[in-house]
Image (cartoon, helix red, strand yellow):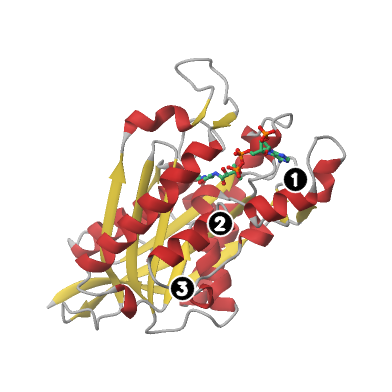
Amino acid sequence: MTIRAVVTGVGHYLPARVVENAEFEKTLDTSDEWIRTRTGIERRHFAEEGETTSMMGTAAAKAALADAGVDASEIDAVIVATSTPDLTFPSVATMIQKELGMSCGFAFDVQAVCAGFIYALSNANAQIVSGQVKKVLVIGAETFSRIMDWTDRSTCVLFGDGAGALVLEAQEGKGTPEDRGILSVDLNSDGNYKDMLYVDGGVSTTGTAGKLRMQGNALFRQAVQKLASTAETAIGKAGLTTQDIDWIVPHQANIRIIEGTAKRLGHAMDQVVVTVQDHGNTSAASIPLAMSVGKERGQIKTGDICVAEAIGGGLAWGAIVIRW
Ligand code: UT7
């Protein structure tokens, strides 16, 4: 008998404030046309003043619990992927645990920037298959609008805020790719690429939160190659081939990266869940947001095999294969 971590619920939250590309034309030397053609982004959501990562994560978690038909009191662990926590500590996860009315289980944050949700899912999967926990909430939540340099047109038009969440439950499987649940994971990082994407502040350096800095073009070239490679590795570890994949659920950074990766994997764009036009890059929230929207649209259905892949600061990157 094999234990599998099966997705039983998914949900998301987006802040009410929608900012169209044209808004940036008022303050920056940019255009809707440049942003659309170079990134695929048309609009993004920004949190209101006072609206925090934990608030958005709580809303997404409640939606996922409702979708799963699971009460918060049944959850053994809450894992949050974020690089934009409310406070340096305690973790966003413990704040969400409180908001959900939980007084049991354990909660902690994972920080792997845009790859954070893959890392968090990997951790949840390991805890489930080792028998440590049975029901886990895995949340990606970000307020990247708080670390933007609004004078830097090469970064501030790219990012957005939001949250997505999955409920994972231990279920018995046969140990074959026919099983529902997480079938494989591939994680990678290389600290030599630090300067390609980082935030120029922090607790032990400046004592401030800092602003995001990115060598976009250099990162672009790394992204397609590394994302296709990690996806192929994860698919192979699952005992599958790229032909077996029903849906690619990519990190939503740039439509050109998404298209390039799909092409390398031999998939047409009608097998890719794309939300970048409406959300921009929401970092660790981007994959669970895409999963939730993809299910809502009727794209991802029970039994479908999905590969999710992401890359971000570190560099850190990875992929996960899930039979939904
Ligand atoms: O989530 C983590 C992963 N993130 C990524 O993977 C992001 C990867 N990078 C990218 O998506 C793209 O590199 C960007 C969208 C960031 C930039 O697109 P690009 O095609 O690589 O453009 P570029 O950086 O080579 O810049 C081309 C030109 C430059 O002008 P010059 O030097 O040719 O005169 C930029 O200054 O575009 C200019 N530019 C802009 N122009 C209008 C940069 N940002 C803007 C802008 N509006 N917002």
Q: Quadrant of residue 129?
A: bottom left
Residue at image point 60% right, 28% down: 211
Q: Residue furthest left?
A: 1
Secondary element at tag 1: loop
Residue, disc 1: 48
Label 3: which secondary element = strand
Name the mark on residue 256. 2
Camera-side residue of 249 and 196: 196
Q: Tell me if label 1 and label 3 are in contact, CB under 8 Å.
A: no
Q: Mark 3 and mark 2: span between their CA atoms? A: 30 Å
Q: Is mark 2 within 8 Å of ligand 1?
A: yes
- Along the horizontal axis of the image, is 267 left or right of 2? right
Q: CA distance from mark 1 to mark 3?
A: 27 Å
Is residue 106 visible in this depiction of the protein?
Answer: no
Asked whether residue 160 is in view, the answer is yes
Circles 2 and 1: CB distance less than 8 Å?
no
